Amino acid sequence: MAIDSVLSSPLGPPACGKDAKALQFIEEMTRNADSVQEKVLAEILSRNAETEYLRQFQLGGATDRDNFKSKIPVVIYEDLQPMIQRTSAGERKLIPTIHEELDRRQLLYSLLMPVMNLYVPGLDKGKGLYFLFVKAETKTPGGLLARPVLTSYYKSDHFKTRPYDPYMVYTSPNEAILSADSFQSMYTQMLCGLLQRQEVLRVGAVFASGLLRAIRFLQVNWKQLVDDIEQGILNPRVTDPSIRECMSKILKPRPELAEFISKECSGENWEGIITRIWPNTKYLDVIVTGAMAQYIPTLDYYSGGLPKVCTMYASSECYFGLNLKPMCKPSEVSYTIMPNMAYFEFLPHDPSAPPLSPDSPPRLVDLADVEVGREYELVITTYAGLCRYRVGDILRVIGFHNSAPQFKFIRRKNVLLSIDSDKTDEAELQKAIENASLLLREFNTSIVEYTSYADTKSIPGHYVIYWELLVKDPANSPSHDVLNQCCLAMEESLNSVYRQGRVADNSIGPLEIKVVKNGSFEELMDYAISRGASINQYKVPRCVNFTPIMELLDSRVVSAHFSPAGPHWTPERRN
Ligand code: AMP
């Protein structure tokens, strides 16, 4: 289709015929949000009618909303865990999926560039430098493959044999993305990005933390990369034969480029390094909403304030939707849930309301019926079999596109600490503290109070745990070494996503314990009360991120300790 005959879209003039179709699809879906949702629910219920899970609720073949809502309970992961455990075991959450789900994800991906092209022209004139990674996969005892959702996608034919699209050309070869060795993968992706520096129009990773990890990698490894570019020979640490073969076709001696990179990287000042090395970059494509907002200042520093584009909102359970105004400020980002992805319901979230009781089941609202300004917890029913499953994300409605609501991501429930894809909740932190405190017993020492903080000032970021100790026998107080071991004991009891980040991906730095003076937590309480907290109801926050509170705690630190080694982590069984 010629450009001038392209259908115009209420979202803006499409860049090409393919984009016109994608924008039209978005219009259709969002105009008919409620009827699409009704159809999706009927489709899911009729397809899955014979599943053991649905049969127990005796829908009797009904596929309508009323029957569904009155008969099927709202659940959380823990409710489903016994069923999931029948085919799998392990501590990481495992979410069922089906092959066809890849098509749905691909469909959502295919909508992102057409929207982007409305705002940034000329993205077909260059490439994207994206740092994308696969992780090790395992087999469950029941024989099912278990791997992160993005690993499934990158390893699928949808990604590997994607047709050429001038708007989606990456500098990273598939061979590098698909290497499970994170060093070799990152090294090659960075090298390819440097070799094609003038062609790069956008730089990205899935989350902000991933892009910062790449910058850190460049800081540590630029000399070797420069050597490779100068001599046209790939570093022998990259041993993967498919990468070596692919790079042998690309790598030629380029002394001038090597000299340029060396000059930029050898300086002390890395401010604006992204735009210095990749001068044609128009934006950073990374998620900076939710827990990732903590990385915005660092990204701004390294990129000289390039726009940060959050294109989509997704999870292992389901891909939800996309941002229709991708060039907006991070604080204004909203995601439009695409009604074809799953059946969506919304649990009104009112922190001041009494907790839900099992006798009065919550009233869930449909996608088209949510109200602007209100907050909800997202509940999904997916083609892959999750029914009325609480995702744990809290969203606020900030407007509508046609009849589809647009949501601002507020937070994930119960996550205290997060550096990369790790999510540590209050119970996990408490358990880790208890395990570490066992090491203090023989020193007659106990932990009086604790709180925590995700320190992302350095890359990779790390968990900081503040401890106030009661040392009953000062002559025999725990040594520096013992406290270092406490850091490791905490790490050992954190979940496997955390430990994998520490050991296999190096995306999380060693955990730090800062011991504070006695009485520091009382001062913390005084401070909170002076700011209006109730004395009766005051609870020690188990995570702090308010600068004055951190300053107060930091000024009371008497010693700091780091984990001396990586915690135990191995993929259960490798393919
Ligand atoms: P996972 O299943 O480990 O990939 O984590 C999915 C979760 O990551 C979601 O439920 C959200 O809590 C969070 N998440 C995903 N996309 C975004 C986004 N665009 N903004 C904020 N948080 C997000």
Image (tube, rainbow, N blue to C red):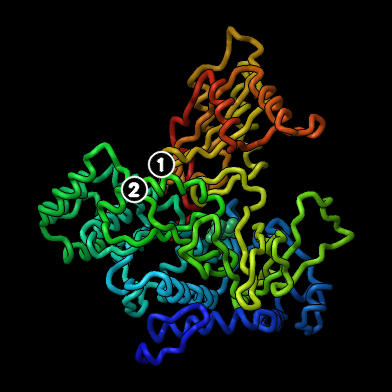
Q: Are marks 1 and 2 in contact (CB under 8 Å)?
A: yes
Give above or below for 463 relative to 313. above
Taking 343 as reference, is 568 left or right? left
Q: Residue furthest right?
A: 359
Between residues 81 and 89, which one lies in front from this camera angle?
A: 81
Q: Horizontal and vertical percent for residue 7? A: 46, 89
- Which residue lies under the disc numbered 2? 215
The C terminus, quarter of image: bottom left
Q: Residue at x 23, y 39 (%)?
A: 267
For mark 1, give the secondary structure.
loop
Where in the figure is residue 178, as x and y percent of width and height?
A: 36, 63
**Image quadrant for the N terminus?**
bottom left
Instruction: Using the rendered view, name the quadrant where residue 159 is placed.
Output: bottom left
In depth, the one of 557 and 46 nearer the eye is 557
Instruction: Kindly identify the amino acid type of the residue bearing the numbered disc 1.
Output: Ile
Q: Which mark is residue 459?
A: 1
Q: Which mark is residue 572?
A: none
Q: Is residue 83 visible?
A: no
Q: Earlier in the sequence, mark 1 or mark 2?
A: 2
Q: Position of residue 52 (x, y in %)?
A: 73, 73
Asked where in the image residue 172 lies, by quadrant, the reply is: bottom left
